[in-house]
Amino acid sequence: MQRPSIVPIAELVEEPYSSVICYPKLNNEELTRRVAELEGLGVTAVEFSGGASAFGVRVPLLGKGFAGVVVVGYIKGQRVALKILRVDAERPDLLHEARMLCKANTVNVGPQLVGASRNFLLTQLIEGDHLPNWLRRQKEKRVVQKVLGEILEQCWLLDEMGLDHGELSNAPKHIIVDNNQKPWLIDFESASDSRKPSNVTAVCNFLFSGTGKVAQLISEILGKRNKNEIMLDLKVYRQQGCRENFEKIVDSCLR
């Protein structure tokens, strides 16, 4: 992993940093607009660090996805997560994601929204590891049960408020466990408050009922789950998503 580089905002017009601000195709006019946009958000510097990489970029990143790349930004001396919209992204802006995250924040789900504009999203920086990597290191059953229980609870809160995350049926990069063993749902770019929420169902399928690596790791730590019982409880919950039916799911998944 490369050493972190903290770059003042005025120097972002220089390579290799400009290739990140306008990833994956540099455009000088767009670069000028984006740097001004960052200044308007109060960003004073950007830190290039992390274990992710992107084609043609010679500095480390926190993350890269279909819609954007993620680095560390500085606002008033504080480190925050800074998501940068790819210039070739299909979505027009990051404002929808900001609205969805803001709604999730009202029930204490997701990193706190710090600021947003067309091309940038600033949120609380969560330092930890993605759930699959965390599970490979953490083998204490009670700790894993606690973290998975908190994930289910957050999904219940989203279901209750009518917000569907949209990416939890296959979420290896959408759940981070921080250094205090607290799980966080991240990346609300596909979230919606206009479709029926299925967060509990989606995350249970991912964590307990599927055949992927995460479900296998959980089975190794907690013991084999009764998938038929889980599927039956999920069916009842889909018909009536009350708290009592949710708690039956928690019991069948974690007991």
Image (cartoon, helix red, strand yellow):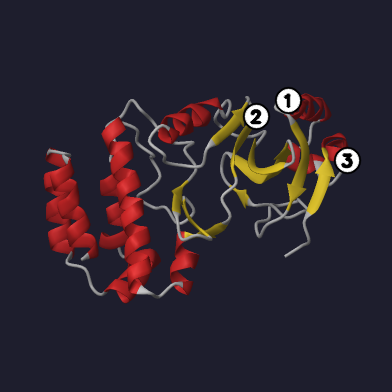
State the separation of the CA atoms marked 2 and 3.
19 Å
Task: Check disc 3 and give the amino acid type.
Answer: Glu
Q: How many marks?
A: 3
- The answer to whether residue 99 is above or below residue 77 is above
Q: Position of residue 134 (x, y in %)?
A: 48, 66
Kindly identify which residue carries mark 2.
Answer: 119
Report the mark closest to the observer, 2 or 1.
1
User: Which amino acid, by three-letter code, is at mark 2?
Assistant: Asn
Q: Quadrant of the C terminus?
A: bottom left
Relative placement, left or right, of 174 versus 199 is right
Q: Are marks 2 and 1 in contact (CB under 8 Å)?
A: yes
- Disc 1 crowd rating (10 Å Cα; few below 14, some 14-19, many 20+) is some
Name the one closer to the observer, 2 or 104: 104
For disc 3, the marked residue is 14
**Mark-to-mark CA distance, 3 and 1:** 17 Å
Q: Which residue is mark 1?
A: 37
Sooner in the amino-acid sequence: mark 2 or mark 3:
3
Q: Upstream in the sequence, badge 2 or badge 1?
A: 1
Q: Amino acid at mark 1?
A: Glu
19 or 215: nearer the viewer: 215
Residue 67 position by quadrant: top right
State the residue in front, 28 or 40. Answer: 40
Q: Looking at the image, can residue 212 be seen?
A: no
The x, y position of residue 194, in whole percent, is: 33, 25
